[in-house]
Amino acid sequence: MEDILKQRSEAYARRRKIVWAEQLGVGVHGVVRVAEDNGNFARFAVKIHEGAAADRRERAIYERLRENDVVTLRGFNVPQLLGWDDGCCAVEMTIVARPFVLDFAGAWLDQAPEFSPEAWAYWEEEKVEQFGTERWREVLAVLALLRTYGIFMHDVTPTNVAFRE
């Protein structure tokens, strides 16, 4: 995966004439880095996806959020879609401060995933452990709000649903 992400990152930087700054995160779907466009004095985040399916899915979700003017969800900042590059499987977005909700590559659009009751119970138990009971209740409220837009997010961790502190 590292080789394809490196190749796509280099190609994207050449096409957009940007310079890579720090890396914001890496996960199963790709890598997120800060891009600097010195000609426009701009800094923005770019997610380079390993696969085209995750790239299309995440972009479609950001487009849905943009169509509905979603900037925050219950006080959590949501990155705004700036652009994309299909050839490099790249999605450009604004950089957001905590608290935030981000990383929609593992989410579903307009269709909830099907899991067994046992899998759901295990998932919820794991999330309560990761977030703590009180914060998990707030995360559930954010997830419910996302569902009103047809977005079913289940790749939920404290790194992609981050509280202020």
Image: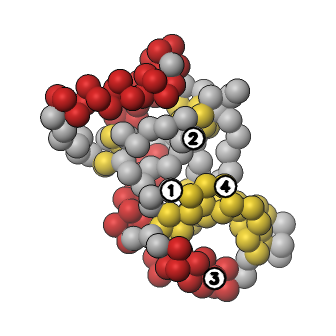
- Residue 158 drawn at (x, y percent): 55, 35
* Whether label 3 touches label 1, CB < 8 Å: no
On the image, numbered disc 2 is attached to which residue?
Answer: 159
Q: Could you tell me which residue is drawn at 47 percent across and 15 percent down?
A: 133
Label 3 environment density (alpha carbons within 10 Å; few <14, some 14–19, many ≥20): some
Instruction: Using the rendered image of the protein, determine whether residue 96 is visible from the camera's viewpoint.
Output: yes
Q: Amino acid at mark 2?
A: Thr
Instruction: Using the rendered image of the protein, determine whether residue 12 is visible from the camera's viewpoint.
Output: no
On the image, numbered disc 1 is attached to which residue?
Answer: 27
Closer to the camera in the image, 57 or 120: 120
On the image, numbered disc 4 is attached to which residue?
Answer: 24
Mark nearer the N terminus (3 vs 1): 3
Q: Secondary structure at mark 2?
A: loop
Query: What is the quadrant of residue 117 in the picture?
Result: top left
Which label is found at residue 10? Answer: 3
Closer to the camera in the image, 151 or 70: 151
Mark nearer the N terminus (3 vs 4): 3
Q: Secondary structure at mark 4?
A: strand
User: Gap between marks 3 and 4, in whole Å?
Assistant: 17 Å
User: Gap between marks 3 and 1, in whole Å?
Assistant: 19 Å
